C-alpha cells in the first residue's frame, strides 16, 4: 500500500499521517509530529460519509483560529454569531471544540443547559430560534469539572458533534477552537475534508508575542489547505466608555496585524478596540452589538462582519 500524505518536516520514510502506523513506526522516532500523528484519526473512517451527509445542509463552515490563547477567539465567535443571527431568516450554529476550556455556553447565557436527544440526533441548545450551540460544557455534571482527556477521546467528541448533532439547514456553522495546531484542529480538518471548510478567521492581538503564534496558524492553514478568510486584530487600543477616548494597551511593536497580514499575503479584516463592556456582555451572555450600538468597538465589529460577508461565496 502506498504511503499516505506526509508533513513537509517528516522523516524520509514517514508512513503518512493517515496510516495506521502514523506516530508508531520506528521511522517516526524523533519526528516533531510523532505525538500528534499517533493520536489523530487514521485510515478510511466509516463515519466520514455520515458527517458528509449531516454537513450537506450547512452552507458555510467557518473556523475561528489563533495560535495564541487569550486573544479573544471565543468572544469573537460569540459576537459574530449574534450578529449573523440578527437576521431572523439566517440560520446559525456554533460548535465549540475547545474541549478543555469550553467558554461558549457562558458567553451565550446558556449556563446549566443540557443536551437533549431525539431520533434525529442530539439537539443543539438554542439561544434564539435561529441560533443553536453545541459544547462539551452542556455535558459536564459540574461547570468546574476539569476535562482531562487525551487526543482520541477529544477526537471522538468532535466527531459526534459533526455526525450526531441535528444541525438542520444552516447558513453558517461557526466553529470555535482552542489555541494552537493540535488534535482538535487536525480532527476537524480531516472530518470536514469531504464536505469542505469555507475558511478560517484568524484572531490576534497587536503585540509580537501573539503575532508570532498566529504566523504559525497561517502556516498550518496553508499546509492543510484551509482557505484563510482573513485576520482580525482584537484588543487594538482601549476605548473609554465615558469619553470614548482611545489608548494603546498592547503596543504593535512590529507593525501589528495589518503589517503581518501584508507580509504573509493574508486579507486584513480590521481592528477591534478593547471596550470593557465586551467582557461584561460575554459574562452576561448578551450581544455586545445590540447592548452598546454606539461603541467604537461595535462599529469595528460591523465593518469586519461586512468584510467577511463580502469574502464568502454566495
Image (cartoon, rainbow, N blue to C red):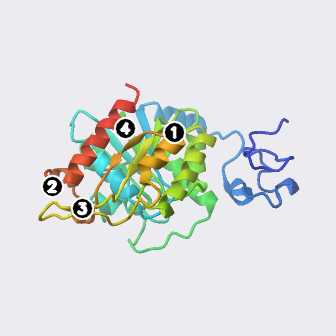
Q: Point out residue 211 in the picture as x, y percentages from the top left corner.
A: 49, 57
At mark 3, the secondary structure is loop
Q: CA distance from mark 3 to mark 4?
A: 27 Å
Identify residue for label 1. Answer: 265
Measure the alpha-carbon separation of dots 3 and 2.
13 Å
Spatial distance from mark 4 to mark 1, Cα to Cα? 26 Å
Question: Which one is in front in this view, the residue at disc 2 or the one at disc 4?
Answer: 2
Q: Is residue 20 visible?
A: yes
Among the 4 quarters of the image, the one containing residue 252: bottom left
Q: Secondary structure at mark 2?
A: helix
User: Label 2, on which residue?
Assistant: 291
At x 27% / y 35%, what residue is drawn?
A: 90
Front of the two marks 3 and 2: 3
* Residue pictured at 39% horizontal, 48% vertical: 232
- Which of the marked residues, 3 or 4, is nearer the chain's N terminus? 4
Q: Is residue 163 visible?
A: no
Cα gap from disc 2 to disc 4, whole angstroms: 23 Å
Q: Give the distance between the C-alpha atoms of the residues marked 3 and 1, in whole angstroms.
A: 29 Å
Task: Identify the mark nearer the N-term, 3 or 2.
Answer: 3
Q: Which mark is residue 219?
A: none
**Of marks 1 and 2, which one's residue comes earlier in the chain?**
1
- In the picture, which quadrant includes the N terminus? top right
Is 51 positioned to the left or the right of 165 in the image? right
According to the image, label 4 marks what residue? 172
Q: Secondary structure at mark 1?
A: loop
Quick one: which residue is furthest to the top in this view?
314
Residue where numbered disc 3 is placed: 275
Side (left or right) of 279 relative to 176: left
Q: Nearer the viewer, residue 69 or 93?
A: 69
In primary-sequence order, the first of circles 4 and 1 is 4
The Cα atoms of the two marked residues, 1 and 2, are separated by 35 Å
Amino acid at each position: 500500500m502506498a504511503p499516505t500524505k506526509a508533513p513537509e518536516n517528516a522523516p524520509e520514510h514517514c508512513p503518512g499521517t493517515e496510516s495506521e502506523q502514523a506516530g508508531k513506526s520506528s521511522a517516526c522516532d524523533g519526528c516533531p509530529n510523532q505525538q500528534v500523528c499517533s493520536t489523530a484519526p487514521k485510515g478510511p473512517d466509516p463515519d466520514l460519509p455520515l458527517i458528509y451527509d449531516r454537513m450537506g445542509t450547512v452552507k458555510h463552515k467557518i473556523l475561528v483560529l489563533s495560535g495564541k490563547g487569550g486573544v479573544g477567539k471565543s468572544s469573537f465567535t460569540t459576537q459574530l454569531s449574534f450578529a449573523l443571527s440578527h437576521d431572523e431568516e439566517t440560520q446559525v450554529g456554533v460548535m465549540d471544540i475547545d474541549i478543555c476550556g469550553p467558554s461558549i455556553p457562558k458567553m451565550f447565557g446558556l449556563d446549566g443547559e443540557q443536551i437533549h436527544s431525539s431520533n434525529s440526533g442530539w439537539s443543539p441548545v438554542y439561544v434564539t430560534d435561529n441560533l443553536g450551540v453545541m459544547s462539551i460544557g452542556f455535558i459536564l455534571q459540574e461547570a468546574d469539572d476539569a476535562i482531562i482527556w487525551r487526543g482520541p477521546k477529544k477526537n471522538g467528541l468532535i466527531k459526534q458533534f459533526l455526525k450526531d448533532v441535528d444541525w438542520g439547514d444552516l447558513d453558517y456553522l461557526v466553529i470555535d477552537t482552542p489555541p494552537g495546531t493540535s488534535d482538535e484542529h487536525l480532527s476537524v480538518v480531516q472530518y470536514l475534508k469531504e464536505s469542505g471548510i469555507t475558511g478560517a478567521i484568524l484572531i490576534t492581538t497587536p503585540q509580537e508575542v501573539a503575532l508570532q503564534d498566529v504566523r504559525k496558524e497561517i502556516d498550518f492553514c496553508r499546509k492543510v489547505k484551509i482557505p484563510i478568510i482573513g485576520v482580525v486584530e482584537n484588543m487594538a487600543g482601549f476605548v473609554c466608555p465615558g469619553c470614548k477616548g482611545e489608548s494603546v494597551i498592547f503596543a504593535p511593536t512590529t507593525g501589528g496585524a495589518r503589517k503581518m497580514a501584508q507580509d504573509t499575503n493574508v486579507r486584513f479584516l480590521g481592528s477591534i478596540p478593547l471596550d470593557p463592556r465586551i467582557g461584561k456582555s460575554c459574562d452576561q451572555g448578551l450581544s455586545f452589538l445590540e447592548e452598546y450600538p454606539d461603541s467604537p468597538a461595535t462599529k469595528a465589529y460591523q465593518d469586519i462582519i461586512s468584510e467577511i460577508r463580502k469574502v464568502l461565496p454566495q
